[in-house]
Image (cartoon, rainbow, N blue to C red):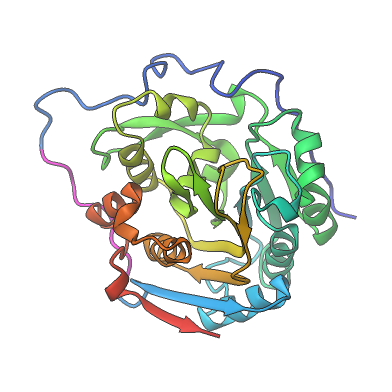
Amino acid sequence: MRRRRFLELAGVACGALALPGCARGPESPPPGAGALPEAPLLPEELRGKVFVARGTDPAASLEAAVDAAGGLVFVPKGGTVVIKPNAAWARTPEQAATTDPALVAAMVRLCLKGRAGRVVVFEHTIDRPAAQVLAMTGIGRAASEAGADVIAGSSESDYIPLEVPRGRLMKRDTVARIVRDANVFINMPKAKQHSATELTLGLKNLMGINWNRQAWHTGPDLHQYIADYATAIPLHLTVVDATRILLTNGPKGPGETADPREVIVSRDPVAADAYASTLFGRRPADVGYIAKAQELGLGVGDKAALQVTRV
């Protein structure tokens, strides 16, 4: 049997153990800083392409969408894959505040069925204790039974410094060591309403891999921080859980929900979020971090430019 690992989060509020120099937000460039280097661009064949599967079986939908997107060809034989769901809150799957555990388990199985040697499901929970959150969401048990190690970032030592040279406001922050050391990183956000950013989608879900996310909320532009941070994260695949979405009182709920029954897969993280935003009756441009990520060259955020394949 594969080794299971749960690292309990310390019993402190998120951001209470901020890294030195981060208390007023991620470090900004000095006044008069020179022009930014161009952000890395996706290969043209991946830009704007979104694959959407709809159905009552989340695992089957995921498999169909991943297959249509070209499979997991980017996973090296014997490599380590880190999967980042949204499991920040002590909510049940039915409340639509966290990623469906069936989807997480299905992705673990796909990675192990392919060439992965190890799969880690990582989360930095906001509600505490972490073990209880992972149990209530169903993600801890589902991921473990599928063959993954489940890790909750427990202390400052689980994170390492991260340079963000292409950021406009953010120039350095932190990232979970396990994410930085992995061969492949897969982002599996829950599509839901958010009080501070309109929506929580894939790009915002990356806030869960840094140590002091609360610092971002104290800075001048949360949307720019989200986009900046994404320029420094080697993201291989985004899978947006839109099987059930939270329409109100996000990000934690409980609130009003809807059931699009969609699983959204893309190698383009901006395109994945742009498409997902339309499920809420919004334009991608209404969500600041989508527009800012497109400006940084991270992908396609214009609805008219998306190439959506339904499977």
Give the vertical position of 242 relative to 213 (above or below).
below
Magenta residues span: 35-43
Secondary structure predominantly adopted by residues drawn in magenta: loop
> Residue reaching furthest front?
256
* Camera sees residue 298: no
Q: Residue at x 50, y 26 (%)?
A: 212
* Residue 303, image x, y percentages: 31, 70
* Residue 190, image x, y percentages: 58, 54
| Residue 41 within the magenta-colored segment of the rendering | yes
Give the vertical position of 232 relative to 183 (above or below).
above
Q: The C terminus appears in which quarter of the rendering? A: bottom right
> Which residue is nearer to you in this view: 146 or 100?
100
Q: Residue at x 81, y 35 (%)?
A: 132
Q: The N terminus appears in which quarter of the rendering? A: bottom right
Q: Where is residue 106, by image quadrant?
A: bottom right
* Camera sees residue 277: yes
Q: Residue at x 64, y 39 (%)?
A: 88
Q: Residue at x 42, y 16 (%)?
A: 23
